[in-house]
Amino acid sequence: MSPEDLNPGDVGPGSEVAVLVRGLTKSYGNVHAVRGIDLTIARGEVFALLGPNGAGKTTTVEILEGYRHRDGGQVEVLGFDPGRQRSRLKQQTGIVLQSTGVDSYLTVSETVAMYAGYYPHPRPVEEVLELVGLTEKRSSRVSRLSGGQQRRLDVAVALAGDPELLFLDEPTTGFDPSARREAWQVVENLAALGKTVLLTTHYMDEAEHLANRVAVIAGGRIVAEGTPATLAGRDTARVVVSYRLPDGVSAPPEFGGPTGPEGRIEFMPDDLTAALHRLTGWALDHGVSLDALRISRPSLEDVYLQLTDSASGAQPAEASSKSKGKRR
């Protein structure tokens, strides 16, 4: 069953639905932060919620976590209403914030064990450490961990109670490329365990690499939803053919013209196969090299920027959360 086939009647114990939202609204005075959101996330899915600052993303996630009360709409998370059954929901969810406040003088294993003790059916500490790649650091003080290792510990703390659903808030902000790839591996490990992951990120490559589906929120509304490859029809958008020519060589007008400081030439053919045949035939006939020949469709970032820019005129300023970085 695909997420699109799920409906409110599917929610409950053993349901294939992890998160179901219908008509969600939230305002702060005259500011309408969330304006009627509908959302469905299947169990075992990695789902990315994308949106600029102030779009309603944080408010939506905090309502799902049970840290904010909604004004209207239906919300079910693992079969619970987070506004009324937060204590029961907390036993089945884990939250990884942008920053946390674990005791820097405890060891890694002591930290995970402490948080595991808050749950009725925790996951064994050694399994958690292995899952996040901290087995060799089990006896190290938190204060001696690198930034990437501390982020792994944040995930370990969230996993201590063996939750069904994890909220990951900007998990790789400030990471170098190597640390980001390591963090991605942790998320992939969670997906392999069948965990449901709700990810918020500003990195489009991260969403594209990790998420089964993404939703873009702007102006308090979901403006697009789908797989990273098909969002907003990017899989069927017209392709762009680009290349560079040797100095002093010009291409026929049908093959485009220079578009940037690097001297790349671009054009958007209606028939890609025929256009490439003509272009490469012309190049061979004239002994011309088509350097850096590239065929591309709009990237996820291109689509994201187009969607959010078009909604920017109606985008509300989202109220800040004083609890941000302190929820547990």
Image (cartoon, grey):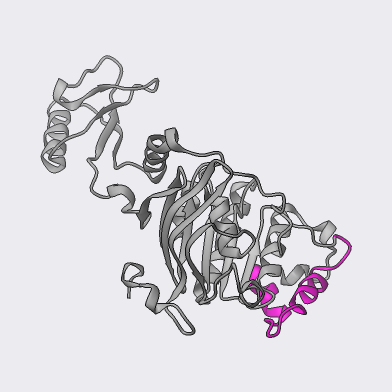
In the current view of this chain or complex, which residue is farthest to the top?
A: 248
* Residue closest to the eye, 118 or 243: 118
In the current view of this chain or complex, which residue is farthest to the right?
A: 105
Range of residues picked out in magenta: 104-132
Please state the horizontal and vertical placement of residue 56, each as a whole percent of the image.
Answer: 52, 48
Please state the horizontal and vertical placement of residue 230, each as a whole percent of the image.
Answer: 31, 53
| Residue depicted at 32% across the width and 67% down the height | 4
Compared to 146, does 290 lie above or below?
Answer: above
Compared to 213, does 260 lie above or below?
Answer: above
* Residue closest to the eye, 114 or 69: 69
Q: Is residue 111 magenta-colored?
A: yes
Q: Is residue 159 left or right of residue 248?
A: right
Q: Is residue 49 magenta-colored?
A: no
Q: Is residue 102 left or right of residue 130?
A: right
* Residue closest to the eye, 299 or 328: 328
Q: Is residue 186 visible?
A: no
Please state the horizontal and vertical placement of residue 88, each as a whole percent of the image.
Answer: 63, 78
Compared to 30, does 69 lie above or below?
Answer: below
Q: Is residue 163 visible?
A: yes
* Residue closest to the eye, 188 or 9: 9
| Residue depicted at 34% across the width and 54% down the height | 229
Q: Is residue 234 left or right of residue 210?
A: left
Q: Quadrant of the N terminus?
A: bottom left
Compared to 289, does 30 lie above or below?
Answer: below
Query: How many labels were placed on the picture?
Result: 0
Query: Which quadrant of the figure has residue 214?
Result: bottom left
Please state the horizontal and vertical placement of residue 234, each as a whole percent of the image.
Answer: 29, 47
| Residue depicted at 65% across the width and 68% down the height | 132
Q: Quadrant of the C terminus?
A: bottom right
